[in-house]
Amino acid sequence: MFNEERRFEQPFRWAMVGGGRGSQIGYAHRSAAQRDGLFTLVAGAFDLDPQRCRDFGTNLGVAADRCYAGYKEMFEAEAGRADGIQAVSIATPNSTHYEICKAALNAGLHVVCEKPITFTTEEAEELKALAADKGRVIGVMYGYSGFPMVQQAREMVQRGDLGEIRVINMQFAHGFHNEEYEKNDPGLKWRVSPQASGPTYVLGDIGTHVFFLGEMITGLEVERLSCMRQSFIPSRAPLEDNAHVMMQFKGGAVGTLWASAVNAGSMHQQKIRIVGAKASIEWWDEYPNQLRYEIQGEPARVLERGMNYLYQDAAGVSANRIGGGHAEGFFESWANLYHRFALAFDAADRDDQATLSELWFPGIDAGIEGVRLCEKCVESADQNAAWVEYK
């Protein structure tokens, strides 16, 4: 079971950029980060409007003089305080991630950033080098990877329960944007605007989530891919609201990825199916406490979170926050990741490289590969779905 007694002498003094009033993602970050007592929210640049920022921040319990109208002002002011911030989470539109993350690292802060972390792999690689130079850690918020049964799936693949991996089918295909809702929804408007969102919409916004699960669970690397993408709502062009990707992995495995916001009637349909030579597993985020396990020649079975037949030394068991049969969900997954981010930040502060090398969490390399996926899909789609080398 989850170890709730793991504590530091003092929690990390933590701030947010973005995530102000009405932000669903901002609320998720705050709920997850503070759940285990490893982070304390002491400052924030929640809103570009100073009055709104101060009003919102003080309602959260942040001192008025530590509610800032901009991240630059916050980083400078906090650096001059004996009790200044040690870590920051970035929950702003995509176009701002690179500059804010770079400024945070230069200010000596650990970072948790929403994805995609940058618009280009070159920028992401620059942040990786800067973080290494500063001895800081970057966590990237692939929030679904904290579910215990995703960790169980990873352990099963690593132990060879499926045999050699042959096929990976990935999809994240909801239907909530099947019409031009952005006309009256500012939160969606920026996601379908290239200036704020970057070169992709659904590939970067949701496709990277399930792609990371595929990478994390199997450990396989893409060799080349072919992508076709569509803008079924014409005003979203050149950004896609639907995309299909075919992949070839190093070692011979193949895969597909379907990312869509126009799968009418669907809630999420984020699923990943991994097919091996001996068996297959399938996980669906709408039923996150179950993992379907199918061995050739045997009846299909459903593995349940929190049960003793799961691998006891896997994160899939140690991350359980309540016994089997009770529902765990989105906030628990995010809290599991923030717990790991805190352990990584602490190890970096102590220069404990052994712990850092053994600790799994979605870090800068995960962020780089998400950006690379978007770049390569655009490159392929612009050449009429031509096959392109991944690296």
Image (cartoon, rainbow, N blue to C red):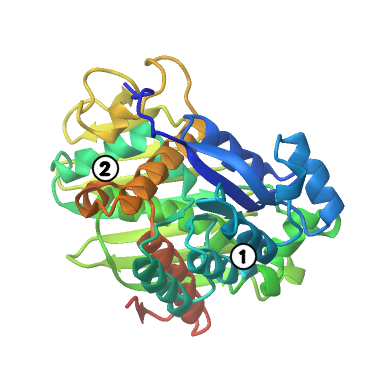
Disc 1 crowd rating (10 Å Cα; few below 14, some 14-19, many 20+) is many
- What whole-number distance in Å separates the C-alpha atoms at marks 2 and 1? 29 Å
Residue at 54 percent of width and 54 percent of height = 206
Q: Judge whether residue 40 can be spotted in this image.
A: yes
Residue 167 in percent (x, y) is at 27, 54
Examine the image and state in which quarter residue 308 appears.
Answer: top left
Residue at 23 percent of width and 33 percent of height = 314
Give the labeled residue for mark 1. Answer: 94
Residue 156 in percent (x, y) is at 21, 38
Which residue is at the front of the view, 115 or 139?
139
Residue 112 in percent (x, y) is at 50, 53
Quarter of the image where the N terminus is located: top left
Name the amino acid type tagged 1: Asn
Establish if 154 lies above or below 9.
below
Q: Judge whether residue 180 can be spotted in this image.
A: no
Establish if 216 lies above or below 379.
above
Q: Which mark is residue 64?
A: none
Q: If you read the primary sequence from the N terminus, does the residue marked by circle 2 or circle 1 appear first?
A: 1
Residue at 48 percent of width and 20 percent of height = 327
Residue 377 in percent (x, y) is at 47, 73
Q: Which mark is residue 154?
A: 2
